[in-house]
Amino acid sequence: MADPEQSDSKASGRGQDTSEAAKAALAWTHTARFLTTASQLDQLPVTELPEFAFVGRSNAGKSTAINTLTQQKRLAFASKTPGRTQHINLFELGPKDAADALFADLPGYGYAAVARDAKIRWQQVMADYLALRRSLAGVVLMVDARLGFTELDKQLLAFVAPRVGNGSVRLLVLLTKADKLSRNEAARALAQAQAVLGELSTDEADVNMTLFSALNRSGVDDAAELLRSWVDAGLKAAR
Ligand code: GDP
């Protein structure tokens, strides 16, 4: 499933110890800093920087994943404060004077207590963001490994499927809270994800998945390296 061009850097990321490539990638993710927040698509800054959107059902472990990847305890905290839960929060990465990517923390969806109107409104913002945001270069979807893909997760994938299919948006699925799974359960979670993601597969599609745990750090190095490789691939293409 991996992009063949990325296979070298990906292969070097495997293994028990954090590799040099993973260290460099984690040093990069650690540079993440809050940029701005917006409740509507047209309030987001227009940017040439590649943007990676973090999406998932509420409680899927999205904030924890962002905080773990960036090694910052409270970075994704803003997204949890009342009044901000329906906002898109943008973070900037890279050198202070030469940012090279943005992370977009999108509101969690599927929270039962949210009123129907708010849900429908939010669904529209999400669909528009995923279909129209020009700088969107990648989607990181958090799925609770014990629950697997829900209908809302599949709907979200459907919103972005055309852009994944033509290779303009890359996809990484983090099967979160993997520390709670037995070996068998983990294998089952991967197989289910593989089946769902198989439907997105085309010659151009760059679709990736990994078990992920903030607790035992599984998948953290690989995810950071993959995101970094997406930036590098964009820089190479722009040259
Ligand atoms: P969000 O609503 O998607 O941002 O989810 P949170 O990051 O707030 O996580 C929801 C719950 O899952 C919290 O109680 C977290 O402590 C827990 N959680 C998140 N990641 C992990 C993990 O890797 N392992 C375990 N065991 N729990 C996790």
Image (cartoon, grey):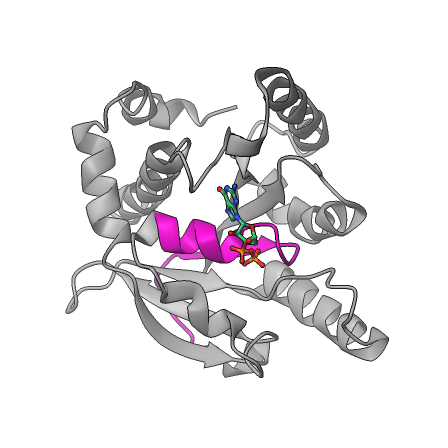
| Residue 123 pos. (x, y %) | 74, 67
53 relative position to 28: left or right: right
Instruction: Give x and y (percent) for residue 182.
Output: 59, 21
Q: Residue at x 53, y 39 (%)?
A: 174
On whether residue 46 falls in the magenta region, the answer is: yes
| Residue 123 makes an appearance in the image | yes
Q: Which residues are magenta?
A: 44-68
Q: Residue at x 37, y 49 (%)?
A: 68
Please determine whether, in this image, residue 55 is positioned above or below residue 34. above
In the rendered structure, the answer to whether residue 129 lies left or right of residue 238 reads right
| Nearer the observer, 107 or 3 | 107
Q: How many marks?
A: 0
Give left or right: position of 28 versus 196. left
Question: In the image as oriented, which residue stretches furthest toward the right?
Answer: 116
| 153 w.r.t. 118: above or below | above
Pick whichever, 187 or 73, lies toward us: 73
Quarter of image, res 58: bottom right
Q: Is residue 53 magenta?
A: yes
Q: Is residue 53 visible?
A: no
User: 19 or 137, which lies in front?
Assistant: 19
Q: Is residue 87 above or below residue 26?
A: below
In this rendering, position of residue 169 left or right of residue 235: right
Identified at 45% across, 74% down, the residue is 78
Percent across and percent down for residue 230 are: 36, 42
Residue 15 figure quarter: top left
**What residue is rendered at 16% in x and 67% in y?**
96
- The x, y position of residue 70, in whole percent, is 32, 53
